[in-house]
Amino acid sequence: MLTSAISMLILAKFQGGYTWATYASSGGKYTVDMPGKVGTMVRPVPTDAGTIQMYSAYVDLGQKAFMIMHNDYPKEGDSAKVLAGVWSGQTSGKEDLKVLRKTSLKWQGIPAMEGEFDYGTGANVTHSRVRFVLKGKRLYQQMVIGIGSSVDRAAADRFFKTFKIS
């Protein structure tokens, strides 16, 4: 019995060839399972409301990347407009953009938008799966991006399903 429990833990940790670990952002007030060593960065982002700080946590796996970003707006805005603006910012200017799915929803009772899109041509087609969540003034952007078919759907599902806001 103990052997099978240990085997299950090992399988869960290395699912899909990844070394999974729960990443906790105390400043961002969230947790999420990440499939490798997490890097972080902070950068200023100009917006209509002024410059804000964007906090990012990411795992770069070469042909694919898992990332989550958060930032606080100076004041609360209309959630539908903010989420539509974030979608537009992520998709505008992309060569040969093909929107595969775009859905506005309530995620855990919070205004959100999820979608998938491809852009680029030939062997350089990039696939993106995204979720944007707006809780009060805080915007969370969760993304899996990969070249061609490099994105492992099961890994992406785990990344999205384990995201929790505290």
Image (cartoon, rainbow, N blue to C red):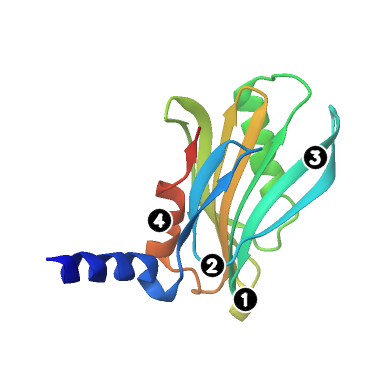
Mark 1 sits on what residue? 62
Q: Is residue 99 above or below residue 73?
A: below
Q: Earlier in the sequence, mark 4 or mark 3?
A: 3
x and y percent of residue 33 in the render? 47, 54
Mark 3 sits on what residue? 53
Question: Disc 3 to disc 1, how far (Cα)?
Answer: 26 Å
Mark 4 sits on what residue? 158
At x 66% / y 68%, what residue is drawn? Answer: 120
Where disc 4 sits, the SS reads helix
Callout 3 amino acid: Gln
Task: Report which quarter residue 158 is drawn in.
Answer: bottom left
Callout 1 amino acid: Gly
x and y percent of residue 78 in the render? 65, 20
Q: Nearer the viewer, mark 2 or mark 4?
A: 2
Instruction: Count residues near mark 4 (Cα–Cα under 10 Å), then give few for <14, some for 14-19, many for 20+.
Output: some
Residue furthest bottom as drawn: 123
Q: Earlier in the sequence, mark 3 or mark 1?
A: 3
Where disc 2 sits, the SS reads loop
